[in-house]
Amino acid sequence: MGITGWVKNTNAGHVEILAKGNTADLEGFINWCKQGPPKALVTNLLVTEKEEEAFTTFEVFR
């Protein structure tokens, strides 16, 4: 999707994502997150801006 950063599940059962990319790629990613993968149930999405960090990949933490 043209983004870098990470994603992880929290102990509270939420998903936390830190993503970096250009505006168009981030907008596309946010729209995808509103639906999620096929078996996901997305009930709320909170998007906030954060100070930029340097990433070279997108990682999934478990």
Image (tube, grey):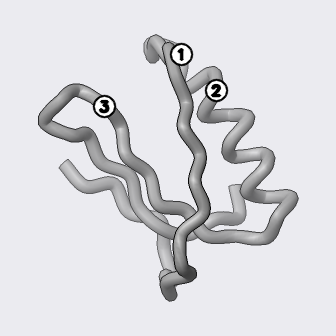
- Say which residue label 2 marks: 34
Residue at left offset 35%, top offset 37%: 15
- Left or right relative to 17: residue 29: right
Q: Nearer the viewer, residue 15 or 3?
A: 15
Residue at left offset 41%, top offset 61%: 6
Residue at left offset 78%, top offset 45%: 28
The amino acid at mark 2 is: Lys
How packed is label 3: few (under 14 Cα within 10 Å), some, or many (20 or more)? few
Q: Earlier in the sequence, mark 3 or mark 1?
A: 3
Q: How far apart, in angstroms, are the residues tagged by discs 2 and 3?
A: 14 Å
Q: Quarter holding the N terminus?
A: bottom right
How packed is label 1: few (under 14 Cα within 10 Å), some, or many (20 or more)? few
The amino acid at mark 3 is: His
Q: Measured from the top left, where is residue 22 in percent x and y?
A: 79, 70
Compared to residue 36, the image places residue 16 above or below, namely below
Query: Which residue is situated farthest in the left direction here?
Result: 11
Q: What numbered label is drawn on residue 14?
A: 3
Q: Measured from the top left, where is residue 31 in percent x and y?
A: 73, 35
Circles 3, 1 touching at the beta carbon (< 8 Å): no
* SS of the residue under disc 3: loop
Tell me which corner region of the image, top left, top right, bottom left or bottom right, holds residue 60.
bottom left
